[in-house]
Image (cartoon, grey):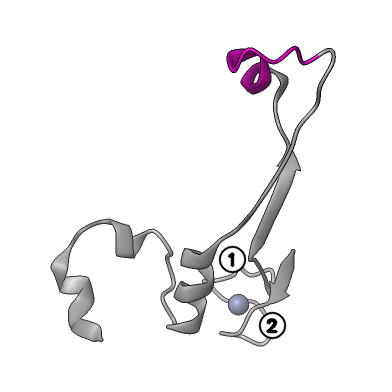
Amino acid sequence: MDASCPHCGGKGCNVCKGTGWIEILGAGMVNRHVLSGCGIDPDVYTGFAFGVGLDRITAICHGINDARVPFEGDIRFLKQF
Ligand SMILES: [Zn+2]
């Protein structure tokens, strides 16, 4: 699921990579190799995965352009709050 970029109002910016949209809920089919790696026969079963990116939503709410930055462990990042 995509949401209109709150930083540019859908006009396009560096946060949304010029698209005007930000993905906040990802989903997709599980690769058959993942299933077979778990001992599940991919010819019998298929998989569907989805997730809520709380880190991404938090980054959007706080104006953090790159959701990876809070996980880098650099204490200088916290000084802006
Ligand atoms: Zn934008």
Q: Amino acid at mark 2?
A: Lys
- Against 42, is 7 above or below? below
**Residue positioned most to the right:** 44
Whether the residue carrying mark 2 lies under 8 Å from ligand 1 is answered with yes
Q: Which residues are magenta?
A: 33-42
Q: Which residue is mark 2?
A: 11
Q: Find the distance from the CA under tag 2 to the CA under tag 1.
A: 10 Å
Magenta-colored stretch includes residue 39: yes
Magenta-colored stretch includes residue 10: no
- Against 48, is 45 above or below? above
Left or right of 72? Residue 27 is right
Q: Amino acid at mark 1?
A: Lys
Describe the element under mark 2 as helix, strand or loop. loop
Residue found at x 59% / y 18%: 38
Describe the element under mark 1 as helix, strand or loop. loop
Which quadrant of the figure has residue 43? top right
